[in-house]
């Protein structure tokens, strides 16, 4: 089965994570600049309940891979994206029902190779 790994990380961690994923043979990924916040509403210290929500700059990586590679990829991302501070990010693992390569119409695992 194919899985999609989506992770939201700090922008300054992107290059290090990208290089480490390359070393473990991750060949393709999508990177998007995003803004968002967690339950702290964008603040690093406790804020008043009526404080406005601050959206912080983050980076989202999206990678579709075989299920067997997921744990190694998660471990790599987690160890390098960690900041020991609130807002370091999240990793989501999502089942992928199918993949289609537009150019050749190949489907499934072969479409991500």
Image: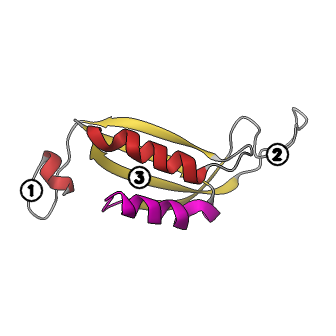
Closest to the observer: 92 or 22?
22
Residue displayed at 31% across by 44% down: 69
Picture quarter with the C terminus: bottom left
Percent from the top left, x then y, of residue 27?
Answer: 30, 62
Q: Main secondary structure of the magenta part?
A: helix
Where disc 1 sits, the SS reads: loop
Q: Which residue is mark 1?
A: 105
The reply to whether the magenta stretch includes residue 64 is no
The residues bearing labels 1 and 3 have C-alpha atoms spaced at a distance of 21 Å
Q: Which residue is mark 3?
A: 62
Picture quarter with the N terminus: top left
The span picked out in magenta is: 11-29
Residue displayed at 76% across by 41% down: 41
Closest to the observer: 50 or 48?
48
**Crowd band around label 3 with a 10 angstrom C-alpha radius: few (<14), some (14–19), many (20+):** some
Image quadrant of residue 89?
top right
Name the outermost residue toward the top. Answer: 49
Residue 44 badge: 2
Residue displayed at 59% across by 52% down: 81
Percent from the top left, x then y, of residue 90?
Answer: 56, 42
**Crowd band around label 2 with a 10 angstrom C-alpha radius: few (<14), some (14–19), many (20+):** few
- First in sequence, mark 1 or 3: give its number: 3
**Does the residue at mark 2 contact the one at mark 1 (Cβ under 8 Å)?**
no
The residues bearing labels 2 and 3 have C-alpha atoms spaced at a distance of 26 Å
Total count of labels: 3
Residue 79 badge: none
Where disc 3 sits, the SS reads: strand
Q: Is residue 4 above or below residue 10?
A: above
């Amino acid at each position: 089965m194919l899985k999609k790994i989506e992770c939201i990380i700090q922008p300054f961690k992107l290059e290090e994570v990208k290089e480490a994923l390359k070393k473990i043979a991750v060949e393709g990924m999508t990177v998007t600049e995003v803004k968002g916040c967690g339950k702290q509403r964008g603040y690093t210290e406790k804020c008043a309940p009526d404080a406005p929500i601050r959206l912080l700059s983050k980076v989202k990586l999206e990678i579709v891979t075989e299920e067997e590679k997921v744990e190694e990829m998660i471990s790599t991302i987690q160890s390098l994206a960690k900041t020991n501070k609130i807002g370091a990010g999240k990793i989501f693992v999502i089942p992928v029902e199918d993949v289609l390569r537009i150019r050749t119409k190949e489907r499934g695992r072969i479409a991500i190779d």
